[in-house]
Image (cartoon, rainbow, N blue to C red):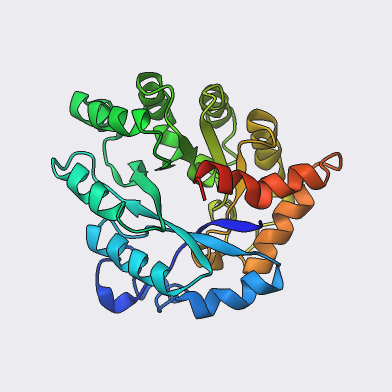
Amino acid sequence: MRIDAHQHYWRIERGDYGWITPEIPVLYRDFVPSDLNPLLIKHDLDGSIVIQAAPTIDETEYLLELAADHSSILGVVGWLDLFDPNHRRHFERFCQHEKFLGFRITIQEMSDSSRILEEDFINALRVYEEEDVPVDLLVLSSQLEHTVQLLHQVPHLRGVIDHIAKPRVRDMEMDSWLAAMREIAAFPNMYCKLSGIVTEGDHLNWKAQDFIPYIHHVLQLFGPDRLMFGSDWPVCLMAAEYDEVLQLLEESLPSQWGESERNKLFGLNAKTFYKI
């Protein structure tokens, strides 16, 4: 099974995508399965995992309804606010949908990421840790210190770092990002998505060599069993077409990686992590 483990769908008229504005014309339109399906077919992908793009319960319900109608959507990673005392009720309702896979914690959107170390948040996350629920972590490289501290509180969390934690490729950030990622990789249940990389570089003038050192470090840290390919389509369109994203990753893989390692990266690991 070949899977794109990270992409988005949205309808602008729904009104809960505050970050998608007319100032980003390439994204300011609807994106639905009929837009992506030709690309999945072209690249011999069996389907995709759709990730929440708005911090609302309503958007997750919209994605679950969409998934029920489209076989190319293999599953949905929804949104939960663990500070909301009703998060458990929302989670249990989502679980009634066959294609609900887990949820994403959007640390990126927090002005103070130390909030994830508050007792109520940790206690809430521990419940999902005990239940082995897949949890995506959307985090900026500047928030990794708090993320590492959180993982020490939930060391068995079935988690995945989205977009290799968004290192500032434009600024050639490396040392602090790498040190934190090394700590995260030491947690055996933590995975990493090779996704959302191109948008961290120069959108207009990026070249493969800008990203290859970051990709190689992640390959070494997490190994072939804990990495997933994700296109981050359509957000990637700000910097690259779907074909270019896939080509960048393919060309960055070490020559010693054979069919087994590639099959894991391009689908089997996502199937395992999300229990598809």
Residue in the image at 39% along x and 29% along y:
147
Residue 167 seen from this side: no
Q: Residue at x 53, y 59 (%)?
A: 232
Q: Position of residue 209 (x, y in %)?
A: 74, 48
- Horizontal side of 79 relative to 263 (left or right) equals left
- Relative placement, left or right, of 141 versus 80 is right
Residue found at x 68% / y 32%:
223
Q: Is residue 128 left or right of residue 271?
A: left
Position of 23 relative to 176 (above/below): below
Up-down relation of residue 220 to residue 9 (above or below) = above
| Image quadrant containing the N terminus | bottom right
Relative image position of residue 118 (x, y in whole percent):
22, 26
Of residue 7 and residue 17, the one placed in the foreground of this image is: 7
Q: Residue at x 73, y 60 (%)?
A: 247
Q: Is residue 275 above or below residue 45?
A: above
Residue 197 in picture, x, y percent from top left: 58, 51
Using the image as rendered, state which of residue 95 and residue 249 is in the foreground: 95
Viewer-nearest residue: 239 or 34: 34
- Can residue 84 be seen in this snapshot? yes
Residue furthest to the top in view is 152
The picture places residue 14, in percent across and down from the top left corner, at 26, 74
Number of dots carrying numbers: 0
